[in-house]
Amino acid sequence: DTITHDHHPLVPLKGFYLINGTHDPEDVDQIHNLEIRDSDVFVVTYPKSGTIWMQQILLLLEAKGDVTAISKLCNLSNADLIPWIEVKGNREAFISAPSPRLRVTHLQYRFLPPTLSQKKGKVIYVARNPKDVLVSYFYFHKVANMLETPKSFDDFFEKFLRGEVFGSSWFEHVKTWYAHRDEMNLLFITYEEMIQDLRLAVRRIALFLGKELTDEQLDSVVTHSTFSNMRKIPQASYEQVSGALLSHHLGKFMRKGTVGDWKNHFTVAQNERFDRVFLQEMKDFPLSFIWDN
Ligand code: A3P
């Protein structure tokens, strides 16, 4: 399952695609051996499913809704404050980091420490309907310098269905994490639920993390994690992430933030094809997804 074109930015590790340069496969392979503390929290997502959004909510919950506590750290982005465990150098830093260690990851279940399955630490899994994930990922490939610019939407559509992207198969990612949910302290939440009722989502997350906030503090968390408000906060929209990583002139990381944008991109034939694959892959999956609003 190795991708054969020259200079391809993806590199497989045990059947899972990582980004060449951003990730060091040998290092990622060691994540499995990390010692987990009860206070550790991992936000797990397939790419483009609401990672930055959950970073924002967790940071605000930690600060009890006090946005000034976060804006004091103005030259740090959400990704510096709640880093990806799999990005080069971050595994080392995790070992000696003070509690609570809040991290995000796009990794598959098998790469994370098995002690998570003995109910050590906490996991928040955010899932998003895969048609919107595909569209969001297509635009992200244009902006992100570490990823290959898609030849066309058509071409990317096929790559996504084949799992030839960082994160590999969306279907496998969601199914595998979901299958292990009862072994872990895991909260499974969807992007669409967060869109429909952000306050309810934030309350569920706070409850799961054992955070007690007043109604006022909760309101502040909600207000400062809406799409329009996050867009105004440079650290919460990755606006100040280095131009070496993101070509900001080619598009915004905080692109659209809606449910159902796939309808503006999929052809009828593509939609039918996607539905066939989805049905096949997800036939035993008990949850349904929200495809439009
Ligand atoms: P779109 O490209 O569809 O706009 P990730 O952080 O996992 O890469 O996900 C990014 C996607 O989440 C983008 O989707 C982004 O706009 C969306 N997003 C981020 N914050 C959001 C928010 N507060 N409300 C709604 N969508 C948000």
Image (cartoon, rainbow, N blue to C red):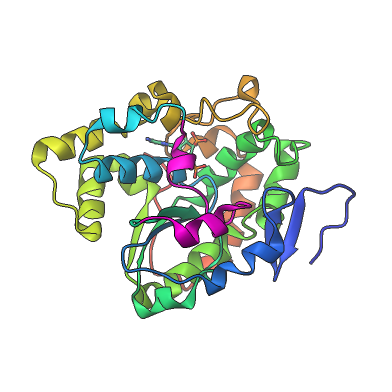
Left or right position of 45 against 194: right
* Residue at image point 65% right, 34% down: 245
Question: Extreme right residue here?
Answer: 6
Q: Is residue 284 magenta?
A: no
Tell me the quarter of the picture where residue 137 sits.
top right
Q: Is residue 97 magenta?
A: yes
* Residue at image point 61% right, 39% down: 266
Question: Extreme front residue here?
Answer: 96
Indicate the quadrant containing the C terminus: top left, top right, bottom left or bottom right: top left
Identify the magenta region.
Answer: 76-98
Residue 264 at what x, y percent from top left?
A: 55, 32
Residue 33 at what x, y percent from top left?
A: 54, 74
In this rendering, the answer to whether 100 lies above or below 142 is below
Q: Is residue 279 something one can see in this rendering?
A: no
* Residue at image point 27% right, 27% down: 68
Left or right position of 223 against 10: left
Indicate the quadrant containing the N terminus: top left, top right, bottom left or bottom right: bottom right
Q: Is residue 120 something one can see in this rendering?
A: yes
Left or right position of 101 against 275: left
* Residue at image point 63% right, 63% down: 28
